[in-house]
Image (cartoon, rainbow, N blue to C red):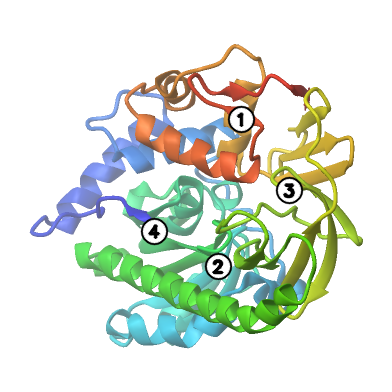
């Protein structure tokens, strides 16, 4: 579930007065001078990222356009079945004729737009069009790009946008996650003229995003139930251990193995044999909607496991685990890549030390423990605790 940043304008505040203050803060910050006030934290952090990336406030080159791939991007987004639900849930905002609904994928590429024709024409002038890339790296601080970067629901108003040509706008966006895989699927956004800013807009957009996540989760559970109807008789008639999982590794049924809810699968399932940290060497048989996994060997012996962190691509870091019976690769989130990099030096760290290294705040131990818990589910048996470190039998190599 997405966290919600505070709205840009609080209930009862005068948006025009605040817009004037924001303009002064923006002008001073971009000129390298002391601003009369601090921007909101989510905005200030975004400005820092964008400035560090070398973007300029007056750059009007426009976003990259991927219109030729639009049909494919829509199919691959996993969100096409949710568009009518977005339209219905956000109709109170868009039916007034002053706002538009926009949905992007996880890379910030705009896949669908609908709403007031007048506002759509204004959006065209910004390049806020289907197929355009609206990450922070493409167009600076904006609700969609900043929601992707911060993983929170974000509202941007007037001069909180990094690019000057976006200052006449206000936008409210919330990320959408797939609870099966934990992956970000995209962002739902409502945008319009700055004069339409309202604090309740962000809350409604975030609520619609959460409802979409719930609908996707219900579909996932229904898929698991359907897979169980195939798995139960299959496992009952099979000799030896086995389990049936869906395409994301969620377990539908288990035979002669300890109960578990999920198995960490690699990004690509290729071939009839697979090595998994939790199960060792397995045979793999495709099923409608999932896989039959049958362990056929003991887990790798101590001293026989090598972990390779590939950090050569900032956008797609990965970890490869190699044992005596095979090799397994998994794509990492940027945060998980940071954590594994910290642990790779072998020194061992407490949750507070990891929090200090990641966030500059040793108090964020709850966040650290949650992230490492997710990592340990994927890399079962390879990450030790108290302190956090790679297990003694693991050899780690980092590629940069």
Q: CA distance from mark 4 to mark 1?
A: 26 Å
Q: Which image quadrant: the C terminus?
A: top right
Q: How would you rate the neighbour count of disc 4 (Cα within 10 Å): few for under 14, some for 14-19, many for 20 or more?
A: some
**Tag in front: 1 or 3:** 3
Q: CA distance from mark 2 to mark 1?
A: 35 Å
* Nearer to me, 120 or 270: 270
Residue ID for mark 3:
279
Q: CA distance from mark 1 to mark 3?
A: 16 Å
First of labels 2, 1 by sequence position: 2
Residue 104: assigned label: 2
Q: Residue furthest top?
A: 347
Residue ID for mark 1:
383
Residue 1: assigned label: 4
- Residue 248 placement, left or right of 204: right
The spot of residue 194 in percent (x, y) is 30, 63
Q: CA distance from mark 2 to mark 3?
A: 37 Å
First of labels 1, 3 by sequence position: 3
The spot of residue 215 in percent (x, y) is 45, 78
- Residue 131 placement, left or right of 17: right
Callout 1: SS:
strand
First of labels 2, 3 by sequence position: 2
First of labels 3, 4 by sequence position: 4
Q: Does the image show residue 235?
A: yes
Rendered residue at 84%/63% (across/down): 284
The spot of residue 365 in percent (x, y) is 37, 29
* Nearer to me, 4 or 131: 4
Callout 4: SS:
loop
Q: Do labels 4 and 1 touch, CB within 8 Å?
A: no
Rendered residue at 31%/69% (across/down): 207
Q: Do labels 1 and 3 touch, CB within 8 Å?
A: no
Rendered residue at 80%/45% (across/down): 328
């Amino acid at each position: 579930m997405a966290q919600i940043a505070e709205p840009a304008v609080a209930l009862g505040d005068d948006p025009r007065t605040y817009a004037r203050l924001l303009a002064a803060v923006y002008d001073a910050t971009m000129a390298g001078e002391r601003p009369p006030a601090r921007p909101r934290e989510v905005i200030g952090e975004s400005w820092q990222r964008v400035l560090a990336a070398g973007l300029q406030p007056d750059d009007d080159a426009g976003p990259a356009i991927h219109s030729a791939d639009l049909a494919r991007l829509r199919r691959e987004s996993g969100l096409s079945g949710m568009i009518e639900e977005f339209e219905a849930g956000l109709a109170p905002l868009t039916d007034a004729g002053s706002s538009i609904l926009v949905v992007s994928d996880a890379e910030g590429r705009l896949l669908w737009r609908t709403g007031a024709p007048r506002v759509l024409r204004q959006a065209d002038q910004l390049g806020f069009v289907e197929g355009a890339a609206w990450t922070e790296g493409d167009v600076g601080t904006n609700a969609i790009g900043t929601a992707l970067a911060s993983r929170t629901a974000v509202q941007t108003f007037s001069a909180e946008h990094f690019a000057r040509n976006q200052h006449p706008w206000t936008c409210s966006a919330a990320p959408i996650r797939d609870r099966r895989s934990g992956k970000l699927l995209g962002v739902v956004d409502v945008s319009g003229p700055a004069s339409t800013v309202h604090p309740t807009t962000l809350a409604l957009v975030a609520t619609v995003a959460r409802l979409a996540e719930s609908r996707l989760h219900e579909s996932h559970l229904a898929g698991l139930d359907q897979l169980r109807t195939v798995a139960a008789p299959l496992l009952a008639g099979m000799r030896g251990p086995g389990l049936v999982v869906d395409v994301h590794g969620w377990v539908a049924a288990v035979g002669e193995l300890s109960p578990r809810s999920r198995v960490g699968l690699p990004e690509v399932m290729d071939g009839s044999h697979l090595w998994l940290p939790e199960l060792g060497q397995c045979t793999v048989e495709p099923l409608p909607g999932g896989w039959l996994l049958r362990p056929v060997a003991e887990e790798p012996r101590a001293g026989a496991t090598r972990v390779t962190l590939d950090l050569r691509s900032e956008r797609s870091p990965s970890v490869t685990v190699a044992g005596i019976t095979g090799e397994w690769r998994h794509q990492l989130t940027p945060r998980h890549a940071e954590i594994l990099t910290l642990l790779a030096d072998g020194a061992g760290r407490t949750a507070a030390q990891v929090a200090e290294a990641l966030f500059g705040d040793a108090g964020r131990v709850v966040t650290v423990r949650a992230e490492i818990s997710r990592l340990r589910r994927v890399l079962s048996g390879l990450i030790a605790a108290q302190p956090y470190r790679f297990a003694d039998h693991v050899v780690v190599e980092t590629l940069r």
